[in-house]
Amino acid sequence: MMAAAPTAPSSFPRLYITSSKPGSVGIISRKQSVVFCSVSKEDGIRSISTKRRQALLQMAFSAVFPAVSLPSFAVDEFRVYSDDVNKFKISIPQDWQVGEGESDGFKSITAFYPEEASSASNVSVAITGIGPDFTRLESFGKVDAFAESLVNGLDRSWQRPPGIAAKLIDCKAANGLYYIEYTLQQPGESLRHIYSAIGMANNGWYNRLYTVTGQFVEDESDKFEFKIEKAVQSFRLG
């Protein structure tokens, strides 16, 4: 069950991004890492490629599954939210609520959202354990290639009938993080704008991938764009 404030939506999505069970969605498991270490050079190259695709798919799921009906907010003041267990800090609007999804010590998600009802504007921090062969962000490729792979993996506009349309707006590497800005639009729905920051850290036992996703619909850009962009850019590890 989710531990959140009473105003938090009861249907907050549980993003089971990582699992050690074969066949789960977006797997980057310890078991796969063991297999990777024992295979031949040729198979190892294919394994690395597969793991990168799986890691990118994991991030894609974080963005595609919205945090359902979330609220509107009018105060410009920010406060610092500090997670001493997961070792990160982020600045969020003063009166935004905090909700936490289920965690098994290998994966967790924390969401920040306004109080009053809104369609889908919020910020979330998803943390996922990854294999020991991923030692730094560059293990996934340079930021340009990484961003293109992530967004192209989400885009289904080429299908017939067309599916979700994804478009890369900007990307850069700074502060030890990858920053990616892009848009998503489901057929017949409002354009969703995404600000994302991706980082990596070790908790003393294994490497973990941090995916910060701030999103708002185009109709709410006047209310939320500044707040969400500032929140994502304020994210720091340690």
Image (tube, rainbow, N blue to C red):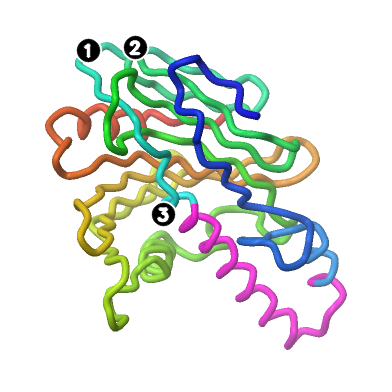
Please give left or right for residue 6 compared with residue 230 in the image: right
Residue designated by label 1 = 75
84 vs 197, left or right, is right
Give the residue number, with chain letter if any, for mark 2.
Answer: 94
Query: Nearer the N terminus, badge 3 or badge 2?
Result: 3
For label 3, the crowd category at 10 Å Cα-Cα, with few meaning under 14, some 14 to 19 and many 20 or more, is some
Residue 209 belongs to the span the image colors magenta: no
- Element under disc 3: helix
Up-down relation of residue 154 to residue 211 (above or below): below
Q: Main secondary structure of the magenta part?
A: helix
Q: Secondary structure at mark 1?
A: loop
User: Looking at the figure, which quarter contains the N terminus?
Assistant: top right
Instruction: Give the mark nearest the N terminus, 1 or 3.
Output: 3
- Seen at 37% across and 47% down, the residue is 179
Asked whether 54 falls inside the magenta stretch, the response is yes
Q: Amino acid at mark 3?
A: Val
x and y, in percent, of residue 160 in the image: 29, 83
Image point (45%, 44%), residue name: 177
State which region is magenta.
36-61
Quarter of the rendering containing residue 134? bottom right
- Distance from disc 3 to disc 2, alpha carbons, whole Å, reads 26 Å
Q: x%, y% of residue 206?
A: 76, 45
Residue at 45% across, 35% down: 124
